[in-house]
Image (tube, rainbow, N blue to C red):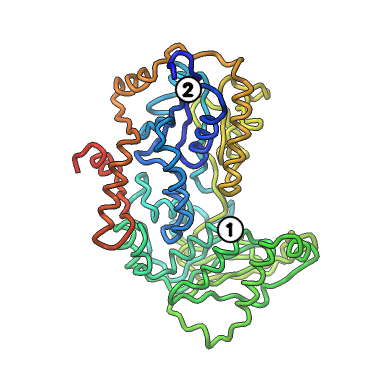
Amino acid sequence: MSSSSALRVAVVGAGPAGIYASDILSKSGLEVSIDLFERLPAPFGLVRYGVAPDHPRIKQIIVALHKILERGDIRLLSNVDYGTDVDLDDLRRFYDAVIFSTGAIKDAHLRIPGIEMPGSYGAADFVSWYDGHPDVPRTWPLEAEQIAVVGAGNVALDVARILAKHPQDLLATEVPDNVYQGLLANPVTDVHVFARRGPAQVKFSPLELRELGHVPDVDVVVYPEDFEFDEGSMAQIHSSNQTKQVVKTLTDWTLREPEELTASRRIHLHFLHRPVEVLGDGRVTGLRTERTILTGDGTVAGTGEMHDWPVQAVYRAVGYFGTPLPGIPFDEAAGVIANREGRVVQADGEPVPGVYTTGWIKRGPVGLIGHTKSDATETVKHLVSDVDMLERAPERDPGAVTAFLAGKGVGHVEWSGWMLLDAYEQELGKPHGRQRVKVVPREEMLAVIRGEA
């Protein structure tokens, strides 16, 4: 492939969205040279840093992503931070087009009084901690016996499960040692999960919900008075096999006798409870919810009936939110890069030449891996159709960008560096019979990659 004739494309963000976009572009029929940038020293994004350690089945997605990158036709440039180490003008020097796939890693807001009080946490931050993200502190304040989790999706279930699970049951996973040690001191007895709508409206996946019922020495408690099904609920149950499975699992749990619930820890699932206030005087002491009622179409209305729950910590798991990128138009309301089917657009709706986006930073934090692939296909299709209109970058030698980074003192990490870290983590796990033990501090990761560990 000639460096002067090949289309030069930078993909910013080496999670599933960026890797799939790179793979699809590489197979588009174009003569193309692709560099995949990643802010962290390790690739794979939320599959490495957003999937609970006790979900190895989902983490196996990394195997497929690994196979794409190990081919060698997509160059990985990790440990390069867009906005700090490079900006859009820099990328335009070396690339004809740029695809942003930076994901959504911040917690969405829950706008109720008291939510910023000490003892109130975002689920995304907690997930980053237990997944060993190098940008978060290595300790977490696990001091509460009763905890509230606000949310009705899989992240809420993950947070509740990790909080309630006995840490020895995580030892077979890649959980970092600092997380295991932190969880050992966790005094929790009860985790309460609150959903504002009914059982037919929750966004739990059937498998994730069923797994909750198999956590050792943790009982799942549901309340028959929370089970209400209106016309909209029944329509959803009849039209969606996933909803039908979720409702069946939840309903089956209502049939258990109280004497069957003997575990030392409990996860309580509450439906038709809308959080209205975090209670406390300088620190969380409770959560106030309003009882809701289904309105006939699957939505809810408040009843004015309030309940106060004595908890010492509140975790909000109400979704993720994208982060603006320097020089890139951003939709502040939606938390995504302003775009039309993957083409980044200015405030007046006109496309920004040569700039594209895919993944959660394009469409918001919804959908599974299958959505990510189709999303990337849409974006790449538009890039390919725009090829003849793209302005060619002035510096086309692939070595120019690495020389630029070196000149700025940026120690970028290529695929061979990740392979060293990957092998090191696997070796750490072998004495304990684990697949790997994740290295957490950034400097330790880089030391391994540089051969200094």
Q: Which residue is mark 2?
A: 88
* Quarter of the figure that contains the C terminus: top left
Amino acid type, residue under disc 1 in the picture:
Gly
Mark 1: secondary structure: loop
Query: Residue at the location (47% across, 26% down)?
Result: 10
Disc on the earlier residue, 1 or 2: 2
Query: How many numbered marks, from 0 up?
Result: 2
In the rendered image, the quadrant that contains the N terminus is top left
**Residue beneath label 1, please?**
153
Mark 2 crowdedness (10 Å alpha carbons): few <14, some 14-19, many ≥20: some
Farthest residue toward the bottom? Answer: 259
As drawn, the residue found furthest toward the left would be: 452
Which residue does the image show at 26% across and 58% down from the upper left?
430
Whole-number angstrom distance, CA of label 1 to CA of label 2: 35 Å
What amino acid is labelled 2 in the image? Leu
Helix, strand, or loop for circle 2? helix
Residue 374, percent from left and from top = 61, 40
Can see residue 282?
A: no
Return the residue nearer the eye: 288 or 444.
444
Front-most of residues 282 and 451: 451
Residue 95 in the image, given as x and y percentages of width and height: 47, 20
Position of residue 228 in the picture relative to residue 364 (left or right): right
Picture quadrant of residue 119 = bottom left
**Left or right of 13 in this view: 380:** right
What is the quadrant of residue 377 in the picture? top right
